Each structure stands twice: as structure tokens, then as C-alpha cells.
Image (cartoon, rainbow, N blue to C red):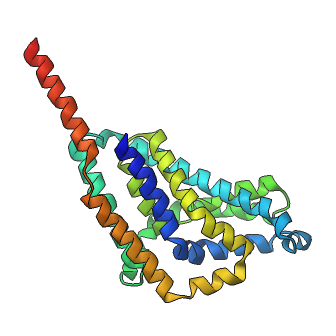
Amino acid sequence: MEAITGSYITAFLLGLFSTVHCLAMCGSVIGALTLSLPIEVRESQRKMLPYVFNYNLGRILSYAAAGAVVGLLSSPLASIDGHTALRYLSIIVMIAMGLYLAGWFPKFAKMERFGVPIWRWLQPIGQKLLPVKTFSQAFWLGIVWGWLPCGLVYAALAVAATVGEPVQAALVMFSFGLGTLPAVMGAGLFTGLVSSLVRANHMRQVAGVSIIVMALMTLLLPHEHTDEQHEIEFHHIDDGAAE
């Protein structure tokens, strides 16, 4: 249970520390969506807030759905050896993401090509929802937006895969989405301030180093899942000996 809770925290912090990347990737998207709103809505942050919230609610639910799929696919690897391999893979991906975010590993962007086929299929659906006039349109557009190819999302999915169970993996991705929420909500409401943050190289480096440190801390922490599995195995051995 502690290992799973750690995955929730890791995913949330991954989203939170990647604020600059979220602003660069999703800030332009939500900026464009905001411009599609009626002018009387755009001129009032109070009126715009429900639309921005619905965009992000849909986006986070799509992350959770992707997490459930990954959790289902990784569930056969929930054994000790399989889980350990997934754990190390997620740490490597997080370190690569941190290096990319800091501007030291640009080739990591190639990872985003994995989601291009799905995005090509969904993008025309999103186009049909524009211009946004209702809260439900904003929500469904957010659902589509959640599948935009993004290396950061894939790094979070690598963390979700380590839990090896669909519901818990979905909750890991939901936690990740909550971590990104302050940045992306802010991008929808305070575009000028957001643009200046995105252009600050030192902010990108601080965020990248934070993710690398978090990945290394995850590596150094005790591997509770393995300990629990060994304990179960020892119980089975004892029971067998007793018989």
C-alpha cells in the first residue's frame, strides 16, 4: 500500500515540477481554446473560469483512462521481477524527462511520436467542437485534448505502469493531472504572466533538475513491493512445510 501511495505522490510531483513544460505545451492550446470563446466570456475571468475548469476536467479524465489501459497491460508484470523492471524503467524515463525539460536532452521529444496515430484520429473530432459555446463542449474538447502527444504524460504513464492494476494506475494518472492543474488553469486565466515564465530558461532548468532529483530519490527509497512479495512467498513456504 505504501508503494502505491508513493506512486500517487511521485505522479503528482511530476506534474507539479513540470509546470514550465505544461505551460509551453498546453498553454498555447488552452490559449487558442480561450480565444474561441465569445468575447463577453473572454473579458471576464469569472465567466471564463467554468470553461477553463471543464477543459481541464476532461483532460485529466483522459489521463486517468490512459492510466487504466496501461495498468491493465502491465498487470501481467506485477510479479517481483516484472515490477522491478517497470520501476527502473519509470525512473529512467523520469530522468530523461528531467534532462529534456532542462534543455540537456532534446532527443527525448522523439518519444512523443508514440501518440501521433491516436492524435491524428482524435484531432478532427476536436475541430468539430469549435467554437466552444457551452460547458459540455469545453468538457469534451478537454477529453480530446488529453490525448495530445506529450512526453511528460508518457513519463507519468511509466510511473502508473509500476502499480500493475487498472484502477490504481488510473488514480496515479489522476494525481498527475492534479499536479499539472495549477499551471494549465493559470495559463487559461493569466496568459501574459504565463508567457514570461515559459521564456525563462532558468525556470526550465530548475524544473528539470527537480524531476531528476525526485527520480533518484525514488531509486534510493526502499522497494516495499518487493518486500511484501517476499513476505507472501515465505508464508507460502512455511504453510507448505507445515503440511
**Where in the figure is residue 242, as x and y percent of width and height?**
10, 14
Does residue 197 show up? yes
From the viewer's side, name the closer residue of 159 and 113.
Answer: 159
Left or right for 3, reference 139: left
Where in the figure is residue 240, as x and y percent of width and height? 11, 18
Residue 241 placement (x, y as % from top left): 7, 17
Compared across the picture, whether 243 is left or right of 132 comes to left
Q: Is residue 48 left or right of residue 21?
A: right
Q: Position of residue 231 (x, y in %)?
A: 20, 33
Q: Quadrant of residue 210?
A: bottom left
Above or below, 215 against 166 in this view is below
Q: Quadrant of the C terminus?
A: top left
Q: Quadrant of the N terminus?
A: top left
Query: Could you say which is closer to the camera, residue 224 or residue 67?
Result: 224
Q: Quadrant of residue 212?
A: bottom left
Residue drawn at point x = 45 percent, y = 46 percent: 169
Residue lying at 29% horizontally and 43% vertically, measured from the top left:
77
Residue, x 48% and y 81% (percent of image)?
A: 204
**Residue at 78% across / 63% down in the picture?**
49
Residue 113's place in the image compared with 12, above or below, is: below
